[in-house]
């Protein structure tokens, strides 16, 4: 990596601005995409302010891709509809080992294959978007909507620091529509909610809602202050370059272009490989910095994907393997008191048995009398059970 120098190669405003942009782009990429910051914050701020100053003195030098242009433009009265030339589909779900074995068998049967290769990735709990790059420049971003028509959220997406406004490297195509998930990291969600609390504003229920609410703000200046992230995992339209032969090669190429790709991915063979990936990720789930609700398996070879095709609104070559839901509703049947060996008294809720988080729950502690009063728990209530 070239060493960083604060010295401009020139004092000419146009060249100086171009150099500052390249430095800031590089710093953003290291910070938001690679998660390996190299430029100290104070230095970043200094370069940013200098670029802002040059641009205000020479407005003709402003480019749409300048790092200063991520602050959010004008508020709008609504989002324009965007037609998806390649529909944005959903995934079929599997829950049990048997579901996964059956999926692999169906795929192998259609392909007449002994052992199918799959790309495994995470199922991010956010919302799907499509990013359209023409000659390497981000020209449009759209939500999934109903799959055929989404909403134009370009102004909001431009404020997401990990999404490049300009693709890099020497394999930039004439047109590529990158698909992926906008999400909010857990730590960013906690911070946002703390800020909401201080401002006496409504808190968000979970990172997914916070991400969705932030992306669909009519005022992009608000979105600019919401810490959103992005991971790439799919493709829509493509022109000017040959489609990579495998899904894993597609994601490698995205990495080269400077797009964020999650490192938690693997290529495996057969149902056994899929289930091992699921277990490994299940063990890691809690320590991941973002929320996931399962993993996704995709037949790796493009040519095999094409042979498998689609059934109604989902590809036959992919499956989401979901973690068991961690929340469910049930009825509060009774409240009794448990006396522990030390004499400690704990109120306990007796529940109508409910399957949640992979187990059947029949009792839940209410901790103490204050908690019972705070929750205003009464026999016959419908309650939400969450496995912690
Ligand atoms: S692929 C053709 N990959 O899950 C398949 N989707 O039910 C298109 N999602 O709307 C989707 N992580 O919002 C794919 N690694 C991943 C994903 C993923 C999360 C979401 C996405 C989509 C929904 C499908």
Image: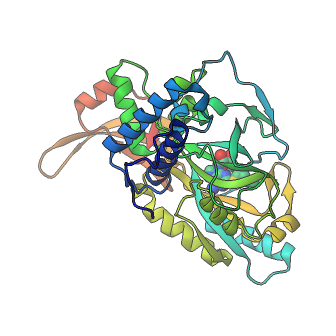
Question: Is residue 53 left or right of 134 when viewed as pictured?
Answer: left
Please tell me which residue lies in front, 377 or 9: 9
Q: Which residue is drawn at the image coordinates 88% and 68% (left, top)?
A: 307
Q: Position of residue 218 (x, y in %)?
A: 61, 21
* Residue 101 placement: quadrant: bottom right
Please tell me which residue lies in front, 115 or 34: 34
Whether residue 288 is visible to the viewer of this picture, yes or no, is yes
The extreme left residue here reads: 342
* Residue 108 placement: quadrant: bottom right
Please tell me which residue lies in front, 92 or 253: 253
What colour scheme governs how the chains and residues are painted in the rendered image of this protein? rainbow
Whether residue 130 is visible to the viewer of this picture, yes or no, is no
Q: Which residue is drawn at the image coordinates 55% and 34% (left, top)?
A: 159
Q: Where is residue 132 in the image (x, y as percent from the top left)?
A: 73, 43
The extreme top residue here reads: 77
Question: Is residue 166 left or right of 307 when viewed as pictured?
Answer: left
Q: Is residue 212 above or below residue 135?
A: above
Tell how many labels: 0
Q: Which residue is drawn at the image coordinates 56% and 54% (left, top)?
A: 260
Q: Which residue is drawn at the image coordinates 66% and 68% (left, top)?
A: 119
Question: Is residue 71 left or right of 172 when viewed as pictured?
Answer: left
Q: Position of residue 47 (x, y in %)?
A: 40, 40
Q: Where is residue 98 in the image (x, y as percent from the top left)?
A: 66, 68
Q: Locate the N terminus by quadrant.
A: bottom left
Q: Is residue 352 above or below residue 3?
A: above
């Amino acid at each position: 990596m070239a060493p960083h120098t604060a010295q401009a190669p020139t004092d000419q405003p146009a060249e100086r601005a171009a150099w500052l942009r390249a430095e800031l782009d590089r710093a953003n990429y290291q910070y938001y995409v690679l998660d390996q910051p190299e430029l100290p914050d104070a230095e970043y701020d200094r370069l940013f302010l200098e670029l802002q100053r040059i641009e205000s003195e020479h407005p003709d030098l402003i480019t749409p891709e300048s790092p200063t242009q991520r602050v959010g433009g004008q508020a709008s009265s609504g989002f324009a509809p965007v037609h998806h030339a390649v529909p944005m589909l959903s995934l079929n779900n599997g829950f049990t080992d048997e579901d996964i074995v059956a999926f692999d068998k169906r795929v192998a049967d259609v392909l007449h294959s002994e052992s199918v290769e799959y790309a495994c990735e995470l199922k991010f709990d956010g919302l799907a978007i499509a990013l359209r790059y023409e000659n390497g420049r981000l020209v449009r971003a759209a939500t999934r909507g109903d799959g055929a028509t989404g909403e134009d959220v370009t102004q909001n997406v431009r404020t997401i620091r990990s999404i490049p406004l300009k693709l890099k490297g020497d394999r930039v195509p004439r047109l590529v529509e990158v698909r992926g998930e906008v999400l909010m990291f857990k730590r960013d969600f906690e911070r946002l909610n703390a800020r909401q609390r201080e401002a006496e504003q409504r808190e968000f229920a979970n990172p997914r809602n916070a991400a969705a609410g932030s992306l669909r703000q009519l005022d992009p200046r608000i979105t600019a202050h919401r810490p959103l992230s992005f991971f790439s995992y799919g493709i829509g339209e493509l022109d000017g370059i040959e489609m990579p032969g495998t899904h894993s090669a597609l994601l490698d190429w995205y990495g080269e272009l400077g797009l964020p790709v999650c490192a938690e991915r693997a290529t495996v063979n057969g149902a056994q490989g899929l289930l091992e990936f699921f277990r490994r990720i299940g063990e890691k789930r809690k320590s991941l910095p973002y929320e996931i609700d399962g993993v996704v398996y995709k037949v790796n070879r493009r040519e095999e994907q094409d042979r498998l095709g689609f059934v109604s609104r989902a590809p036959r070559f992919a499956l989401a393997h979901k973690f068991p839901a961690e929340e469910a509703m049930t009825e509060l049947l009774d409240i009794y008191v448990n006396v522990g060996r030390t004499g400690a008294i704990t109120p306990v809720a007796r529940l109508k048995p409910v399957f949640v988080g992979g187990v059947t729950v029949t009792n839940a502690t209410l901790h103490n009398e204050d908690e019972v009063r705070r929750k205003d728990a009464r026999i016959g209530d419908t309650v939400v059970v969450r496995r912690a």
